[in-house]
Image (spheres, rainbow, N blue to C red):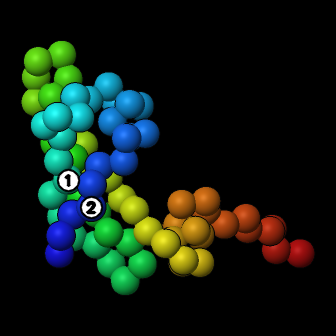
Amino acid sequence: MMAPNVDPAILEALGLDETNAKLVSHGGSGFSSTYKLIGTKDGKERAYFVKTGTGPQAEVMFRGILLTPYS
């Protein structure tokens, strides 16, 4: 599986240099993809875990679900 380009918002939030940041596929499931984000910050190589997904199942995963107490 080909890794997508790194979203500029992620790079900005983490303070990574966009010229050498890359995503490497790191597994996934039927409703998500996971990646290892490798980049440079303050002159040191850093690695981060990134999880992405689309559709209703992924929305539940990222938002969580509201459970109501039993009556």
Few, some or many residues within 10 Å of mark 2 (<14, 14–19, 20+): few
The three-letter amino acid code for the residue at tag 1 is Leu
* Residue in the image at 43% along x and 39% along y: 9
- The picture places residue 59, in percent across and down from the top left corner, at 58, 68
The three-letter amino acid code for the residue at tag 2 is Pro
Circle 2 SS class: loop
**Could you tell me which quadrant the C terminus lies in?**
bottom right
- The picture places residue 69, in percent across and down from the top left corner, at 81, 68
**Circle 2 residue:** 4
Q: Is residue 70 above or below residue 25?
A: below
Determine contact: label 2, label 1, CB under 8 Å.
yes
* Residue in the image at 23% along x and 34% along y: 18
25 displayed left or right of 58? left
- The picture places residue 39, in percent across and down from the top left corner, at 17, 36
**Circle 1 residue:** 23
**Residue that extends furthest to the front in the rendered view of this protein:** 19
